[in-house]
Amino acid sequence: MRTLFLAFSLLALASCSTTSQMQIQTVSPAPSESPIVSSAKTSTPSTENLIDALVNAPELVTYGEDGAHDATVLALYQQNGGEVIPPRKEVRDIVALKGKAIPLLIGCLDDTRDTSAIFIGGYVSGKPYPKVPVGHVCLDILIHISKNLDDNDKNCPRGESELGACIKDGFYFRPDDYTNLGQERPIVRIVKANWLKAYRNGRVKYDYVVTWK
């Protein structure tokens, strides 16, 4: 009898334990509301987005064979009176980064996405004029906001109007230097590598006075 009672007690204990385990396994806590707000609502545009915006900026500039520093996205001129007007917002946003703009611009030198800037010259004559890749627009900004890249060894009169005039050899490429007869040219990669090396060696620094409001 005592043995039968002990067996019955063990059976009842096992049944209770199994029921408890089933309750633990089947009942889960309700998910709590997350306090994290969507990053799309709180994040600011990254520096890469500034280049994307530059690609889509309207009426950036017209580059030409007879232009050196006079054709630039940093100094736009009204046709009547030659009044200087502020650059596009997309350009101003990049310049506002100051020293942080330097590596951003160097990084985009080989970006071949077309912009609203056009180039009158080179191998194409007549309209429609070719669109200028954003990499060259980045080079335009980079040259103008950087210090110590004027080539003082060259005879560079103030009226010099050749493309790339007064820029150190190896630090400039033309708007149409990305391809030649459909083939990629190495000059863009070489220039980018030179800028990157000079920046890492501390030779390229931000040096630009903002005159617009």
Image (cartoon, rainbow, N blue to C red):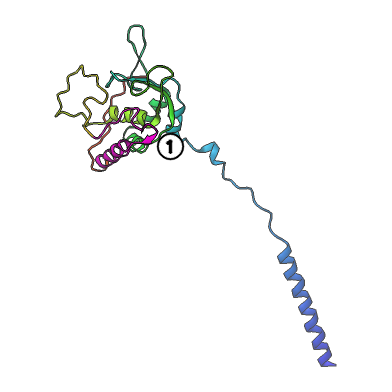
* Left/right of residue 71 with respect to residue 17 in the rendered view: left
Pointer 1: what residue? 48
Count of all numbered marks drawn on residues in the image = 1
Q: Is residue 95 at least partly visible in the picture?
A: no
Q: Look at the image and give the residue range highlighted in magenta.
A: 170-198
Please identify the residue farthest to the right as the structure is shown. Answer: 1
In this rendering, is residue 115 above or below 127? below
Could you say which is closer to the camera, residue 142 or residue 111?
A: 111
Amino acid on which disc 1 is placed: Glu
The answer to whether residue 187 is magenta is yes
**Quarter of the image where the N terminus is located:** bottom right
Res. 178 image quadrant: top left
Could you say which is closer to the camera, residue 31 or residue 182?
A: 182
Q: Secondary structure at mark 1?
A: helix
Q: Is residue 62 at least partly visible in the picture?
A: yes
* Rendering coords of residue 147 (x, y %): 23, 31
Residue at (73, 63) in percent of width and height: 26
Could you say which is closer to the camera, residue 39 or residue 140?
A: 140
